[in-house]
Image: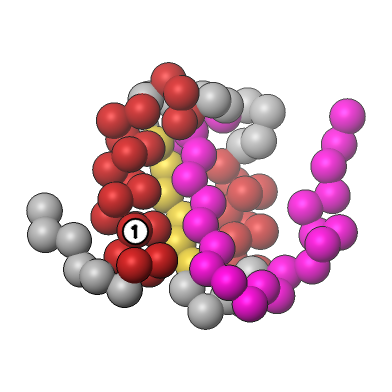
Amino acid sequence: MTIDEYAEGTAFQFPFFAFQGESDVLTPPQPARRFHDEVTAPVKDFALIRGASHFASFRHPDQFLDLMLTKVRPVVTGEAVGR
């Protein structure tokens, strides 16, 4: 099965974040990073979750939560997070 990441376009009016496992074989980091690089959005960020594969947010919830708190939360709340 293949998915066309580009089918919905690459221009977004909202923040765009891509967090994934560095060892993901179903969605390899390199094509995901290329897609991220082609996206235009008011704010965007890309991060790899160390030691994780496809279900990175479930396998390493501590790293995922840290990304949500340090990258996403400040954007949606407009507040800086002191860490």
Q: Is residue 10 magenta?
A: yes
Q: Which residue is mark 1?
A: 73
Left or right of 21: which side holds 30? right
**Amino acid on which disc 1 is placed:** Arg
Give the x, y percent position of residue 2.
86, 36
Q: Secondary structure at mark 1?
A: helix
Q: Which residues are magenta?
A: 1-24
The residue lying at 36 percent from left, 48 percent from top is 68
Rendered view: 78 above or below 61 = below
Q: Is residue 15 magenta?
A: yes
Rendered view: 66 above or below 55 = below
- Magenta part, dominant SS: loop
Give the x, y percent position of residue 72.
39, 58
The residue lying at 34 percent from left, 47 percent from top is 67
The residue lying at 66 percent from left, 48 percent from top is 31
> Badge 1, how many Cα within 10 Å: few under 14, some, many 20+?
some
Pick out the residue farthest to the front.
77
The residue lying at 31 percent from left, 73 percent from top is 78
